[in-house]
Image (cartoon, rainbow, N blue to C red):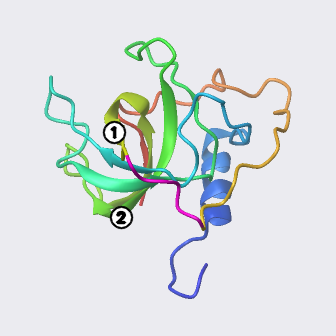
């Protein structure tokens, strides 16, 4: 834990990897938003979610963006870890969350913003353990992401 009693990025990574049963990807896709990019998390125009309001956050380098394999994902859509400027509640009233894995369609990059200078850069690629991957038997995350409280 850090001095302000919030978990560190490494604490978060270990917890998520434990739940997923596999390491988080660290090889950053060339087409992805870079870590430290400022974004606005937007609401879906067709339903009341996935979050109660639109809010700002930062692409987190805890894990590289990964392909979204959900049946309703857009072709080539990525899932990003986003740290929130302020804790947020999802559309079901759950939370507050400080970070979540967000579908790419719900991220609007800040047009003029550069990545934050203190953002951790992605680590070199590492091969996941044999048999690990999206077929790990883990439940599909809720539409809009996997939150961390």
Q: Closer to the N terminus: mark 2 or mark 1?
A: 2
Residue displayed at 85% across by 26% down = 130
For label 1, count other residues whose C-alpha is less than 10 Å away and answer few (under 14), some (14-19) or many (20+).
few
Give the quarter of the figure containing the N terminus.
Answer: bottom right
In the picture provided, is 25 more to the left or to the right than 106? right
User: Which element carries disc 1, helix, strand or loop?
Assistant: strand
Query: Does 132 lie within the magenta span?
Result: no
Numbered circle sitting on residue 108? 1
Q: Quadrant of residue 25?
A: top right
Residues at marks 2 and 1, CA–CA distance in whole angstroms: 15 Å
User: Which element carries disc 2, helix, strand or loop?
Assistant: strand
For label 2, count other residues whose C-alpha is less than 10 Å away and answer few (under 14), some (14-19) or many (20+).
few
Residue range highlighted in magenta = 112-117
Query: Does 113 lie within the magenta span?
Result: yes
Numbered circle sitting on residue 85? 2
Question: Is residue 57 placed above or below 103 in the rendered structure?
Answer: below
């Amino acid at each position: 834990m850090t001095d302000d009693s919030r978990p560190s990025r490494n604490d978060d990574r270990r917890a998520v990897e434990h739940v997923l049963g596999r390491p988080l990807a660290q090889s950053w896709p060339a087409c992805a938003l870079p870590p430290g990019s400022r974004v606005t998390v937007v609401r879906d125009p067709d339903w009341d979610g996935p979050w109660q309001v639109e809010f700002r956050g930062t692409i987190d380098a805890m894990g590289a963006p990964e392909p979204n394999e959900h049946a309703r994902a857009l072709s080539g859509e990525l899932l990003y870890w986003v740290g929130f400027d302020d804790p947020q509640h999802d559309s079901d009233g759950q939370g507050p969350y400080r970070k979540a894995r967000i579908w790419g369609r719900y991220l609007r990059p800040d047009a003029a913003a550069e990545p934050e200078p203190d953002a951790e850069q992605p680590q070199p690629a590492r091969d996941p353990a044999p048999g690990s991957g999206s077929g790990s038997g883990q439940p599909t995350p809720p539409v809009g992401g996997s939150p961390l409280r």
